């Protein structure tokens, strides 16, 4: 799924629509019927880690806005950047086709009610209508435009991706969400101290977690301590720090742990800056056959025994394993 920097860009694209009413809906989502959002007001947008939260309400009364969690150093640049980042907008070419009035992609309103949408859930009566959006690997947000196929699918068809949700607003613009899962949720409990792109990120908490006896590549993917960190950031930070992915954190020196956290934060911030500038971040180890030093790169699915196994790239020469009997 997209990592923290991508979610910050998605949040920036959605934020200008806060305070506007949804006047037309569409999309292929079946779990969440797009029609239930008809006539609601988008009152807030928040991001934390890899999740986007949108608050809808029948009333237009605005509450104090939630934290945008955007680094101050990027605020000015973000305000000037209203164009869609093409590196974020590409979706898979094999999205499910749209069916029914509620899934219309045209500007016309959805006429289907929640009862007419099999499997379409509405928020509980009286509950705050927070919509949680979790993006898939090719998830993206488009503004005032739709994603177009960049290549033929396996069947040879040049079929455009179908958005899961389309929201037209009273101000005249619209948002299209691709490759995502949506569900109603309680108000988000944001924890900026574990968000790698937050100025409130707690380094001490992160260092303590990394210093445990388990492999550092497991801990880095733990969203309780490194919210927003994904597989790309994991691979790049470990390579830049010269640490083997399976090295137990307890064997690393304090300076090595500090360096690893530094690379996590630095790479994430630079990647976010690239997204707002419309440039693509080049990786040094992720999906590479050779490292920058010219060494052969190894690849293996690594992860906790009972957890998710993620493909991991590393250089055995630049990131040598530490002997377990020789703690640093």
Image: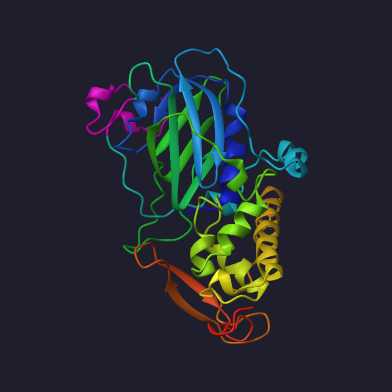
User: Against 245, is 133 above or below?
Assistant: above
| Total numbered labels | 0
Residue 121 belongs to magenta span: yes
**Relative depth, front residue between 84 and 152:** 84
Quarter of the rendering containing residue 209: bottom right
Residue 37 visible in rendering: yes
Q: Main secondary structure of the magenta part?
A: loop
Residue at the location (68% across, 70% down)?
256
Left/right of residue 255 with respect to residue 42 in the rendered view: right
Residue 107 in view (yes/no): no
Which residue is at a point 40% across and 34% down the rendered structure image?
105
From the image, which quarter does the C terminus lie in? bottom right
Q: Tell me residue 311's x, y (percent).
A: 45, 70
Q: Is residue 317 left or right of residue 167?
A: right
Does residue 318 show up magenta in the picture? no
| Residue 98 as seen in the image, left or right of residue 139 | left
Residue drawn at x 54%, y 68% is 216
In the image, what residue occupies the spot 56% across and 53% down? Answer: 226
The residue lying toward the viewer, choosing from 52 and 108, is 52
Q: Residue 137, percent across and down?
A: 45, 55
Q: Position of residue 141 (x, y in %)?
A: 52, 42
Residue 149 in the image: state x and y as whole percent: 45, 53
Q: Which residues are magenta?
A: 100-122
């Amino acid at each position: 799924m997209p990592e923290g920097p991508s979610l910050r860009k998605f949040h920036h694209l959605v934020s200008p629509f806060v305070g506007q009413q949804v006047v037309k809906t569409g999309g292929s989502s079946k779990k969440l019927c797009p029609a239930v959002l008809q006539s609601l007001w988008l009152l807030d947008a928040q991001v934390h880690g890899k999740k986007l939260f949108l608050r809808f309400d029948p009333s237009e009364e605005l509450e104090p806005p939630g934290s945008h969690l955007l680094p101050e150093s990027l605020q000015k640049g973000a305000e000037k950047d209203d164009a869609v980042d093409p590196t974020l907008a590409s979706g898979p070419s094999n999205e499910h086709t749209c069916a029914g009035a509620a899934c219309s992609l045209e500007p016309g309103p959805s006429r289907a009610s929640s009862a007419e949408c099999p499997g379409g859930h509405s928020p509980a009566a009286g509950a705050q209508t927070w919509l949680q959006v979790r993006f898939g690997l090719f998830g993206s947000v488009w503004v005032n435009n739709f994603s177009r196929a960049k290549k033929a699918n396996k069947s040879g068809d040049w079929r455009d991706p179908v958005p899961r949700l389309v929201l037209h607003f009273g101000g005249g613009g619209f948002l299209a969400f691709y490759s995502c899962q949506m569900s109603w949720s309680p108000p988000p409990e944001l924890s900026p101290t574990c968000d790698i792109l937050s100025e409130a990120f707690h380094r001490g908490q992160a260092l303590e977690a990394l210093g445990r006896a388990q492999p550092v590549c497991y801990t880095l993917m733990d969203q309780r301590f490194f919210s927003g960190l994904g597989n790309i950031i994991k691979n790049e930070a470990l390579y830049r720090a010269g640490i083997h992915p399976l090295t137990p954190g307890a064997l690393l020196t304090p300076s090595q742990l500090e360096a690893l956290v530094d690379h996590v934060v630095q790479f994430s911030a630079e990647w976010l800056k690239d997204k707002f500038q419309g440039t693509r971040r080049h990786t040094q180890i992720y999906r590479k056959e050779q490292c920058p030093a010219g060494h052969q790169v190894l690849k293996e699915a690594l992860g906790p025994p009972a957890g998710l196994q993620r493909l991991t790239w590393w250089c055995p020469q630049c990131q040598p394993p530490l002997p377990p009997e020789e703690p640093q």
